[in-house]
Amino acid sequence: MCKKQIGLTLLELMLVLALSGLTCVFAVPCYQNFICRNRLRVATDQLIHGIEMAKQRALREEGRVVFSSVDGGQWQKGQQLVRLRDRRVLAVLPALQPGVRVEWRGNLGQTDEICFDGSGLPEGQWGSFWLHAKGYSGSVRLIMNGVGRIHIT
């Protein structure tokens, strides 16, 4: 009597491994792009939240509030809100995720702060935050116009 053998042949195993490898070759770069886009999205949301919070605090404090980088132009290392009247730090936002780089390009040439007056408007400032993620060719541009409205491109 002949026993029926259960298992894979070498050819079937090689075919499965080849298809798995091919799937990984295409899936890994797509996954890395997904991770980079997600990091940019989170960083964009955090900057928008900081700007909106600065406008609200300027209205509430009825005085000038500065939204600035914690470390002199290194926006990705964290941001803070400072009331100018007494230089009191009102809030500190955490550092952005690793691999995200942020640049502020404003019309007044300042690279590390945006000042909002008591009415919640930027004091003659407008410009763009440029966000880049390491290993990703795209970028996000966060545009703030002269009245503090934000647009994303």
Image (cartoon, rainbow, N blue to C red):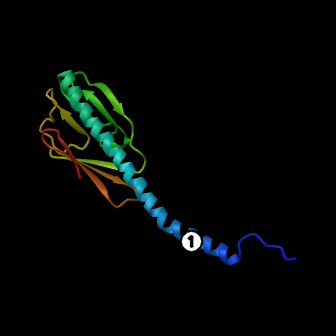
Q: Is residue 92 above or below residue 18?
A: above
Residue 111: give x, y in percent of width and height.
Answer: 24, 44
The residue where tag 1 is placed is 19
SS type, badge 1: helix
Asked whether 21 or 51 is in front, the reply is 21
Q: Quick check: can you spot residue 36?
A: yes
Residue at the farthest right position: 1
State which quadrant residue 8 falls in.
bottom right
Question: Where's residue 41, x and y in %?
Answer: 34, 48
Task: List x then y, in percent, for residue 93.
Answer: 35, 34
| Image vertical order of residue 99 relative to residue 19, above or below | above
Residue 74 visible in rendering: no
**Left/right of residue 116 with respect to residue 100 in the rendered view:** left
Would you identify the image quadrant in which residue 44 lies? top left
At 26% from the left and 31% from the top, the residue drawn is 53
Q: Residues within 10 Å of mark 1 (few under 14, many from 20)?
A: few
136 lies above or below 3: above
User: Is residue 137 left or right of 16 when viewed as pictured?
Assistant: left
**Depicted 33 relative to depicted 151: above or below:** below
Identify the amino acid type marked 1: Leu
Total marks placed: 1
Q: Nearer the viewer, residue 74 or 59?
A: 59
Q: Kindly identify the residue that appears in the image at 24 percent across and 31 percent down.
A: 54
Q: Residue at the spot x=49%, y=62% of the render?
A: 28
Counting from the top left corner in percent of width and height, residue 149 is at 17, 41
Closer to us: 24 or 143:
24
Q: Nearer the viewer, residue 19 or 39?
A: 19
